[in-house]
Amino acid sequence: WINYMKNNEFNPSHTHSGDLSFVIYLKVPNDLKEENKKYIGTDPCGPGGISFVNDLKSDKMIVSEVNIFPEERECYIFPSKLHHMVFPFKSNCERISVSGNINMNENN
């Protein structure tokens, strides 16, 4: 599916179906990049960022959270059951990404 994210929109923590999921960033406007650079606050990756959160936090050897501010043409592939969220932004612009889920065929 294609995501046309506008100001004040966000995706709360969620997972997907399938085995793997992906997101490819097609458009990350300069206004959003500037907003993120200037951000001072408590969100771990700032406006327009994506956060991947592992719920296996009991083990010190496991990374529990990765926060990313995406760039155009970047692609992230991750386990579908990995919790992730997208933070809102205030800039009057539109970020475009493509996402999907992949089911692995165990018979091949």
Image: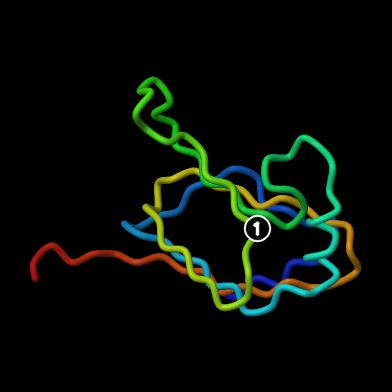
* Quadrant showing the C terminus: bottom left
Judged from this view, the residue extending furthest toward the left is 107
> Residue visible at 88% across and 57% down?
90
Under tag 1, what secondary structure? loop
> Residue visible at 43% across and 45% down?
82
Q: Which residue is mark 1?
A: 69
Query: In this rendering, is residue 44 above or below 86?
Result: above
> Residue visible at 56% across and 78% down?
73
The quarter of the picture where residue 95 lies is: bottom right
Query: In this rendering, is residue 30 above or below 56?
Result: below
* Quadrant showing the N terminus: bottom right
Q: Position of residue 52 (x, y in %)?
A: 52, 46
> Residue visible at 41% across and 62% down?
77
Front in this rendered view, residue 64 or 13: 64
| Residue 34 shown left or right of residue 75 in the figure | right
Task: Look at label 1 and name its amino acid.
Answer: Phe
